[in-house]
Image (cartoon, grey):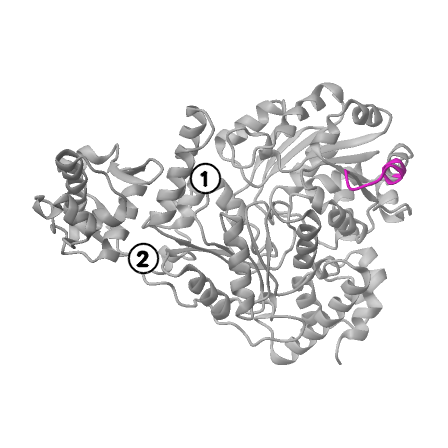
Amino acid sequence: MSSSHTVDPISALRAGDAGQTDRALEILSTVFGYDSFRGEQSAIIEQVASGGDAVVLMPTGGGKSLCYQIPALLREGTGIVVSPLIALMADQVAALEGVGIRAAYLNSTLDYQEAQAVEQQLLAGELDLLYMAPERLVLPRTQDLLRRAQLALFAIDEAHCVSQWGHDFRPDYLGLSVLAEAFPTVPRVALTATATESTHRELTERLRMQDAKHFVSSFDRPNIQYRIEPKASPREQLLRLITSEHEGESGIVYCLSRKSVETTAQWLADRGIPALPYHAGLDARVRQDHQERFLRAEGLIMVATIAFGMGIDKPDVRFVAHLDLPKSIEGYYQETGRAGRDGQPSTAWMAYGLGDVVSQRKFIDAGDGDEQFKRNARSHLDAMLALCETVSCRRVQLLRYFGQESEPCGNCDTCLQPPQTWDATVAAQKLLSALIRLDRERGQKFGSGQVIEVLLGRENERSTQSRHAELSVWGIGGELSEKEWRTTLRQLLARGIVEAEGDYGVLVPGPQAGPVLRGEVTVELAVDRAPAKASRSRPGRGGGGGSSRAAEGLETAERERFEALRAWRTSVAREKQIPPYMVFSDATLVAIVQLQPRSVAELGSVSGVGAKKLAEYGDGILEALPG
């Protein structure tokens, strides 16, 4: 739960005579084992450690946590970290204790005596960092407790949760504006990895941080390869992705429904792929068990709804797959961002089809929100559909949504295999004409299946009863196959040329239909590509789970040493009951293998090996390394 020992290196640095920048660098090296800051980390730390407020937009894996952890260690008092992630607080605290930081959490999982003990540690000045959820922080009793303590700062993590128009709104975050008035002398830093320009403005206003300094990093995650392919047999497509590119590696598979989560997890397990389900309908103890197993195991796949993922700090998630269309680009970006936090090559893959477009629009129209809420949801969906249907670089489109411009990346499917396009103007006019004729002459509206039957001139019971063969549009679409019509219709739906309405998703001309029918615009559509083949070769599997992406460049002898260290790490993690990455990351193990240290002192020069871990694990690493 917490640690009560005194951390001499941190106490000495906090009281030292060196300048703030030098002390920050010393903490980075001594505590965390890194030689230099990345991007704007140093400037953010300087701002907060000096008592200023900061709003930080930085991609997942960009090092946001250091932006409040180091200022909390530099300043007198305890840093209060506001986080919605109660289920992960214990792991977050364990990771900090692992590098010698005195940390604890206050949340509903503690009994009265445990909570009292943490409160006493806070008042006694024995904590560097204290985690709590927003609903606890806004309680008058909690604020009274904090007024009696010496506070270094407030860190508001996942700050996008305050946005009512964002993808992950949490009402309890609205109360955090009270911090500005209740604790005017305590610096605040709001951090998020997911914010459009409008969400950025909203969180600034709602948290009353207009006077804060703003730090906006590039949202680009160049190590992630974005791929979206037409949905044919999605589970088979997923299996091909796993077995050809990510065998033995950790991944997350997102599905929209709880039933789909459970059936997909079982389907994978039946085929020898270790997979677990996670959704809000499972018993809380089952969810917690599955989450802990995913964090601690290597090569396990979590099949989940969006109830899973925020704050997951597992660095070696090698792929994130979507079997259903996400509701927004913000959600998609945050979910795919859980891949490759260690900076190693990773995959963001999605199977997407006509049914996704129809079901998402139907879900919005049938929802309980007011018209403004529905307009906002449609806008989010339209942007997501545009990303799916783009024929240009996906990364360019993704970053542009967040207000950032970039060059084509060369590492997404549309860059690696540019799609072919065709002039679909006549096909679009034929489809729109079929919708209009069916409505005007027969008073009928249908879903995609029957409309395509009419275009192809194929008889069925409905066609016979309604004398569809007598219509002028009967059979006018024979130049395309059924599959090609479905591809065409999907893209027309995404562009608003056709719409699906009502409980049954019947098709009607959309707001962009007029110019198409009048021949005022040309409709260029993409030809569906075949499902992508494996784009990366994979090394053979080694011990301790699947081989690591971080080790791909190692020679045979080095790989043997790396696998020996992984086996040692697994043993230590099991003994301490912590995830293996909390001992050392794969990247750190690779650096150790390449250095081949002969002494504990030499080992201390490796990135990611701080003073506490060196003292705790140094001898064990040297013993585990083969000669």
Look at 51% across and 64% down and name the residue there.
267
Is tag 2's residue or tag 1's residue first in the polypeptide sequence?
1
Left or right side of 307 for 139: right
**Residue 108 belongs to magenta span:** yes
Residue 496, how many percent across, how many down?
A: 29, 37
**Residue 401 belongs to magenta span:** no
Above or below for 477 versus 330: below
Q: Answer whether residue 416 is visible to the viewer in this image.
A: yes
Left or right side of 161 for 25: right
C-alpha separation, residue under disc 2 versus residue under disc 1 = 22 Å
Q: Give the amino acid type for the residue marked by disc 1 in the picture.
A: Gln
Residue 71, how many percent across, how many down?
A: 75, 38
In this picture, which residue range is highlighted in magenta? Answer: 107-117
**Residue designated by label 2:** 418
Label 1's element? Answer: loop
Left or right side of 416 for 471: left
Query: Would you call the spot at circle 2 few (<14 residues within 10 Å), some (14-19), or many (20 or more)?
Result: some
Left or right side of 74 for 273: left
**Residue designated by label 1:** 404
Residue 617, how many percent across, how many down?
A: 82, 64
Q: Give the amino acid type for the residue marked by disc 2 in the picture.
A: Pro
Question: Which of these two is toward me, 187 or 480?
Answer: 480
